[in-house]
Amino acid sequence: MDPDQPAPGGDDVEVRRAWRDALGVVIATSAYGISFGALSVASGLDVWQTCVLSLVMFTGGSQFAFVGVIGAGGIAAAPAAIASAGLLGVRNVAYGLRMAPIVGTTPWRRAAAVHVTIDESTAVSLALTGRRARTVGFWATGIGIWLGWNLTTLAGALLGDVLGDPRQYGLDAAAAAAFLALLWPRLRRRQPIAVGVASAVVAVALTPVLMPGLPVLVAAVVAVIVGWANLFAEREARA
């Protein structure tokens, strides 16, 4: 039996789970878009520029890095802002390679998937097992977040000063909480726990000393090395 396929009769259950997981992540991540819209306007971009960033760039971490650098250094810091956003976006290339067999083989499906291959759509999809459920999870999450993120970006940009500091509402923690909810069920064996802990320690240690984007990439390399070495796997699994 294919380990990537659910048990007989369980396909519909997994598809329902895919929709449920996608909805939870869409709500959590979209709420964070309010914070981006408000921060972007506060950093000097107008409402139109803020909305175009979300429509076209659509990578939360890259967008925050971009407006953060612009806010600190003005238009003269644009090259540094672009470099920071680009570094954070590099991880999406790895996501694309992993998700290629899931999104479909037709050219139009792959072209459409490029824009919604993000942290959240990849995480929701890979947290599932069946091919159909993974496909539903990917598309439902990616398209849902794109719609929600752009709507809340507009709301945050328009309300800006009225909202005050968006962090006081806890919106900056919403996306992280959603990721933890997806990750937690997978931490049942020593090897996944070792990969998660090693990556988290490296990312936290390097964040204060490296430019935005680099800690994530280094942590990803560490995750690959620890996962490939498989040192913490149970003896039966290695055998």
Image (cartoon, rainbow, N blue to C red):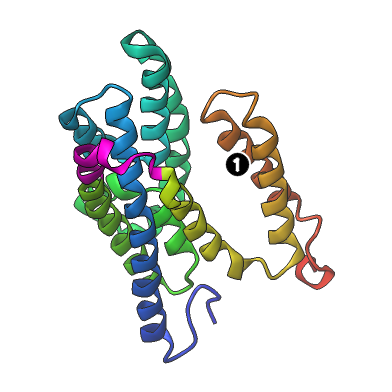
To which residue does mark 1 refer? Answer: 220
Along the viewing direction, whichever of 211 and 190 lies nearer the viewer: 211
Q: Which residues are magenta?
A: 153-166
Left or right: where 208 falls relative to 133: right
At 22% from the left and 53% from the top, the residue drawn is 147
Q: Quadrant of residue 69?
A: top left
| Quadrant of the frame with the N terminus | bottom right
At 45% from the left and 24% from the top, the residue drawn is 84
Along the viewing direction, whichever of 89 and 181 lies nearer the viewer: 181
Q: Is residue 44 magenta?
A: no
| Quadrant of the frame with the C terminus | bottom right
Q: Main secondary structure of the magenta part?
A: helix
Can you name the residue that lies furthest to the right here?
A: 235
Secondary structure beneath dot 1 equals: helix
Left or right: where 119 falls relative to 114: right
Name the amino acid, label 1: Ala
Can you name the residue that lies furthest to the top here?
A: 76
Vertical side of 127 occupied by 120: above or below: above
Left or right: where 235 falls relative to 130: right
- Please provide percent x and percent y for residue 117: 36, 49
- Please provide percent x and percent y for residue 164: 34, 39
- Please provide percent x and percent y for residue 67: 36, 26
Q: Is residue 156 magenta?
A: yes
At 45% from the left and 51% from the top, the residue drawn is 170
- Please provide percent x and percent y for residue 102: 38, 60
Taking the image as drawn, is residue 107 in sight?
no
